[in-house]
Image (cartoon, coloured by chain):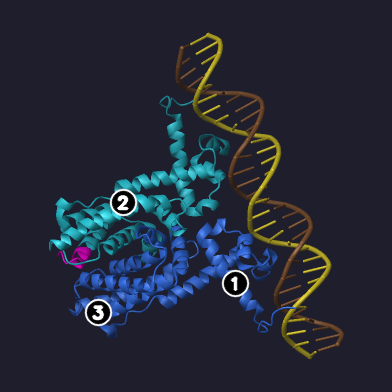
Chain colours: A blue, B cyan, C brown, D yellow
Amino acid sequence: MKKDNKPQKIRAISINKILIAAQDEFILQGYKGATVQSIADSAGLPKANVLYYFKNKENIYHAVLEQTLNMWDEGIGDILPEDGPKLAIEKFIRAKVSMSFNNPKASKIYAMEIIQGAQHLKDFSRTYLRQWVRDKSKVFQCWIDNGEMHQIDPVNLIFLIWSSTQHYADFDNQILTIMNRADYENDDIEHVTKFLTDFILRGCRLK
Amino acid sequence: MKKDNKPQKIRAISINKILIAAQDEFILQGYKGATVQSIADSAGLPKANVLYYFKNKENIYHAVLEQTLNMWDEGIGDILPEDGPKLAIEKFIRAKVSMSFNNPKASKIYAMEIIQGAQHLKDFSRTYLRQWVRDKSKVFQCWIDNGEMHQIDPVNLIFLIWSSTQHYADFDNQILTIMNRADYENDDIEHVTKFLTDFILRGCRLK
DNA sequence: TAAAAAACACACCAAAAGGTCAAGTTTTTG
DNA sequence: CAAAAACTTGACCTTTTGGTGTGTTTTTTA
């Protein structure tokens, strides 16, 4: 007799367990290094059961990646013309730092995928991301033209904000080791957000 | 009959071919995904020959990593008290950007290692890197105390410089795709160096 | 509550991959 | 120039792993 899981939810629960386990394994072992068996163990299911929900390993990876992209998309924040440069940048940085601290795993999966050649993300970069950068660059350029903001290359500014915020997720191991700490604490988000916001606003001569 | 390779250099040449091939394979396929056979193929040697020079795959990886760390070490630049904050930061950024554009592969190997938990680099981080950050932080702190520099958290400043410079190596695929370009060009190094130097110096109120 | 659908799980298989061996060939050395 | 050392390589062995097949149990549905 089984525990009375809400009916019709077994599938969703199992898939979720698998995806969480798979994310961990893919980060720690890489795509090839993560075995279906290790994912199954980590999810607390027999291997055959994992392959019952996902036809093969490739599909598991795709599902993890899709989940990651959704998160990326949600967490990206936005840059709205009506906010003006100062508020927009503040919001953007806050959103990205928040993402990094609250969802480091998504950031890592994404980073590894790009570093390894972006095989599965070429389309995403070529279409969605490229357009996003162009759109937001245009917003920055407007502010510059209006004299609301110092002359700064918007594209490289975006890259700088992405990299400096994601660093706290992707390189958390290194950062914690250097600071001789076991884990991030609540204060850290605020501290980093404040540091980056102040620094970058000054970089933009907005402070 | 063989080509007259400089005598006694066969070993050095073969090992070098293997390490170059291995670096590529490890980046593209990850540790587990890179096979001894694929490394051998890429190096133009039979598998058994590769295993003659390196007892096993683990050893190949260690050699690649060691090479990477040496490069990291050479390319890190330095932060000298006598340079004063402005020049020191300029030099530091220039060195790191140069590293990123001229040796992106080393940066990628390093990044993947850290993201995956820094299994092989824990010692390096715990000893060398931690001390480096502490030493250089102290230098920054002196400048701050002397009023030569705005009050800024030196540790996070170092992280920001590391991340924003390495981004151009680790994420080159994404950057190029977004900018709709096939490769970096010579101008890019200068452009990025200038952008980052100006921006970060402003962030430090040194400009 | 009985039939159908979904979920579970053991045993097995074929391919891939790490690594060994032994028999050669080339190069160095005394 | 002969013996030793270094190098080269195909064949082979063992383990791992992705994936399948088949039968059983649980859950849903009518």
Q: CA distance from mark 3 to mark 1?
A: 41 Å
Residue type, mark 1 in image: Lys
Counting labels gives: 3
Q: Residue A141 in magenta?
A: no
State the image coordinates of residue A185 (x, y, percent, origin top left).
39, 71
Q: Amino acid at mark 3?
A: Lys
Residue numbers of the magenta segment: B198-207
Q: As shown in the figure, which amino acid type bears the numbered disc 2?
A: Met
Disc 3 to disc 2, C-alpha distance: 32 Å
Name the chief secondary structure element in magenta. helix
Q: Residue at x 59, y 67 (%)?
A: A60
Dividing the picture into quadrants, the one containing residue C21 is: top right
Q: Which residue is mark 3?
A: A86
Q: Which residue is mark 2?
A: B99
**Residue A90, image x and y in percent?**
29, 78
Camera-side residue of A77 and A29: A29
Residue at 65% from the left image edge and 77% from the top image edge: A11
Q: Chain of mark 3?
A: A
Q: Nearer the viewer, residue A188 or C26?
A: A188
**Residue B119 in sight here:** yes
Q: Are marks 3 and 1 in contact (CB under 8 Å)?
A: no
Instruction: Kindly state the secondary structure of the residue where label 1 is placed.
Output: helix
Mark 1 lies on residue: A17
Callout 3: 10 Å neighbours few (<14), some, many (20+)?
A: some
| In the rendered image, the vertical position of residue B10 relative to residue B177, given as above or below | above
> Image height check: is B45 above or below A26?
above
Find residue B130 and report its image quarter: bottom left
Residue B60: give its label. Answer: none
Q: Residues within 10 Å of mark 2 (few under 14, many from 20)?
A: many
